[in-house]
Image (spheres, helix red, strand yellow):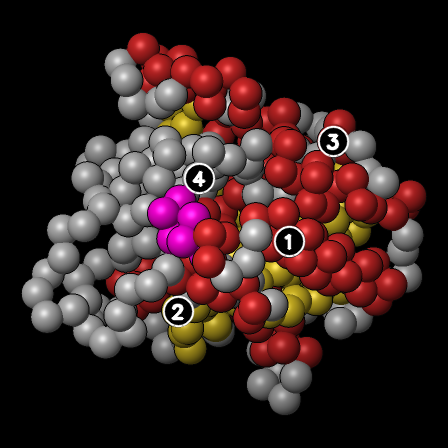
Amino acid sequence: MRVEGVYLDGIGHHLPDWVSAEDAVADGRYRAEVFEASGLTGTHISTKLPALDMAVLAARTALERSSAGTADVESHIHASVYYQGPEGSYPPGYILRELGVAGAGSLEIRQGCNGLLAALEIAVGQLTGVAELAVALLTTAQNFETPLVDRWHGFGDSYILADGAAAAVVTTEPGFAEVRSICSGTLPGLERWHRGDGPLTPPVEQSAEQVSMTARAAAFTDDEMPLARAVESLSEFDVGIIRRALVDADLNVADLARVITINEDARMTEFTTLGPLGIDVSLSTWDHGRSVGHVGAADLVISLDHLLDTGQVHPGDHLLLVSQGPGWLCSAAVLTLLEKPSWLE
């Protein structure tokens, strides 16, 4: 989808205390052979701060950096991966109350690690369509500090789950970056990969069973689709989404200054996404993300914030943002940096 007249005006993130992967190996939480092979060096862990409070902190930073204030927010879209509060509660309402935003429309979406780009796609529709909104606030946050999730191995050996949050202010008034295009799609043939064989009906009693995406994936690849075919399918699908986003932005792969992906083992990103596109891993955000951990849908904003803060990108640069989620979902967006953000001047 080609996009015109939509901009990023402020971004922010929050990361709690950092924990070394080497220390996790020493105390038995992380397998030494995985540590040595993956190249992942650490993660961020919050023992006390809930996901929603981290979302509030990230949103405050994004709004402080933006020309828009809390009174200007007309839409709020919150993306989540894991627990956000008691069943039946409404996470966006909590965030808006803490920020002092009243009267804005709000949505909660659950697209896993694809959530922030999905939120951006919705915001683009709100800002360019019949709603004629001018300011949207996007947030996402995760806290995986629970015995029910093994952050080191529970989602596969390509990731170390991290706690944290990110936020972005999206506007129709020019900001530091222009959204050139955004495309997304669903590959339902891989849906069971993340669902497993669990019942679709509500549980009879509260389950204390640990979440293991690794076991679900193994069940899928054992009796429905071989792993090699599953990875090949998602790679072809993801690359197709990315190519559409580049075409809609009137750009080629060679025009890209950097590629921002989710934080995972570089071998997976290179094999499924970067390699087929002819993009060297050095153009990705792997080197930074390997020490951050996989903060669900927040990875892309955290990496963008890092690139801006360290001066690795400049006005005129074109950036490709890519994320995936269960379902199988993939989204790709192209941004063009227009100016050095005001908060860095």
Give the residue type that dot 2 points to.
Glu
Give the residue type that dot 3 points to.
Val
Q: Mark 4 and 2 residues: CB-CB less than 8 Å, in contact?
A: no
- Asked whether the viewer can see residue 162, the reply is no
Label 4 vs 1, first from the N-terminus: 4
Q: Secondary structure at mark 3?
A: helix
The mark lying in front, picked from 3 and 4, is 4
Q: Which residue in the protein does label 1 denote?
A: 229
Residue 238 lies, with reference to residue 3, above or below; the image says: above
Front residue of 285 and 7? 285
Q: Mark 3 and 4 residues: CB-CB less than 8 Å, in contact?
A: no
Q: Position of residue 104 (x, y in %)?
A: 41, 75
The N terminus - image quarter: bottom right
- Circle 2 crowding by C-alpha within 10 Å: few under 14, some 14–19, many from 20: some
Q: Which residue in the protein does label 3 denote?
A: 281
Q: Mark 2 and 3 residues: CB-CB less than 8 Å, in contact?
A: no
Q: Which residues are magenta?
A: 213-220
Front residue of 56 and 111? 111
Label 3 vs 4, first from the N-terminus: 4
User: Horizontally, is 215 left or right of 136 in the view?
Assistant: left
Label 4 vs 2, first from the N-terminus: 2
Label 3 vs 1, first from the N-terminus: 1
Q: Residue furthest front?
A: 223
Marks 2 and 1, how far apart at CA: 33 Å
Q: Secondary structure at mark 1?
A: helix
Q: Which residue in the protein does label 2 denote?
A: 108
The mark lying in front, picked from 4 and 2, is 4
Q: Which residue in the protein does label 4 denote?
A: 156
